[in-house]
């Protein structure tokens, strides 16, 4: 579900790009049997040529499903870093934008922010935590391991613990030279993904 950034590196602490987020969510959705048939026409985006081949179908699905929108009416910005606010908003939309009770409780998440419900839902569902007790840091980059861990928690919340960690991979986490740099909180998620 989460491929390495090369044949030998996973780059767990690197920021995730918008196209990586779309591709990972697309593979996750396919893995759990979610309908991924819809494909938006992306020809109106002037930076379509910048979308990597591996991510093109995923970006079209995310746009069609209303999970991800352009950064403007004519740009997708596939190589832009996905922020924590953006990532939780995409997951919140993926989950069907469920009703949220109250707020996230973070001082840096204004109640009227586009991502407020996404943060509140992800935190209340136990999918993600703040960077501190009082700060979510919505503008910080979402790292590859943070997104993998959040998706893994969503999988466990909705479908239970996978039978075997790593069951989806021919290549295991240990095969990557930077496996030791995966944070403790993300070990199971990265091995599964």
Image (cartoon, rainbow, N blue to C red):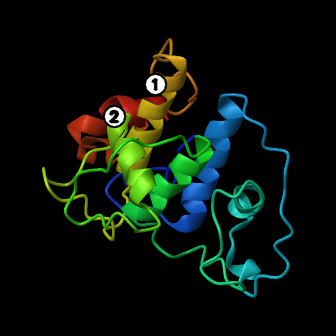
User: Residue 125 appears in which quarter of the rendering?
Assistant: top left
Q: CA distance from mark 1 to mark 2?
A: 9 Å
Q: Position of residue 72 (x, y in %)?
A: 64, 84
Task: Look at mark 2 in the image and give the residue it sits on.
Answer: 126
Q: Is residue 5 above or below residue 114?
A: above
Which residue is painted at 39% across and 59% down in the image?
A: 116
Q: Position of residue 180 (x, y in %)?
A: 25, 42
> Is residue 39 something one can see in this rendering?
yes
Closer to the camera in the image, 162 or 120: 120
Q: How dense is the environment of label 2, judged by Cα within 10 Å: few (below 14), some, or many (20 and up)?
A: few
Q: Callout 1: helix, strand or loop?
A: helix
Give left or right: position of 77 versus 156: right
* Residue at the top extreme, as displayed: 163
Q: Position of residue 33 (x, y in %)?
A: 73, 29
Count of picture labels: 2
Q: Callout 2: helix, strand or loop?
A: loop
Give left or right: position of 180 versus 100: left
Closer to the camera in the image, 172 or 144: 144
User: Residue 45 appears in which quarter of the rendering?
Assistant: bottom right
Say the numbered circle drawn on residue 157.
1
Say the numbered circle drawn on residue 28.
none
> Is residue 166 something one can see in this rendering?
no
């Amino acid at each position: 579900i989460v491929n390495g950034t090369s044949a030998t590196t996973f780059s767990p602490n690197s920021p995730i790009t918008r196209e990586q987020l779309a591709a990972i969510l697309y593979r996750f959705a396919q893995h759990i049997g979610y309908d991924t048939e819809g494909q938006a026409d992306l020809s109106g985006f002037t930076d379509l040529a910048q979308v990597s081949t591996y991510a093109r179908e995923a970006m079209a699905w995310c746009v069609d499903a209303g999970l991800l929108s352009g950064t403007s009416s004519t740009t997708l910005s596939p190589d832009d870093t996905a922020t924590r606010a953006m990532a939780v908003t995409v997951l919140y939309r993926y989950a069907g934008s469920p009703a949220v009770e109250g707020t996230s409780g973070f001082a840096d998440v204004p109640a009227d922010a586009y991502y407020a419900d996404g943060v509140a839902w992800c935190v209340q569902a136990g999918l993600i935590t703040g960077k501190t007790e009082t700060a979510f840091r919505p503008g910080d980059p979402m790292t590859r391991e943070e997104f993998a861990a959040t998706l893994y928690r969503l999988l466990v919340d909705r479908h239970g613990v996978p039978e075997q960690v790593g069951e989806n991979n021919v290549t295991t986490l240990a095969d990557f030279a930077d496996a030791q740099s995966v944070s403790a909180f993300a070990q199971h998620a990265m091995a599964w993904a």
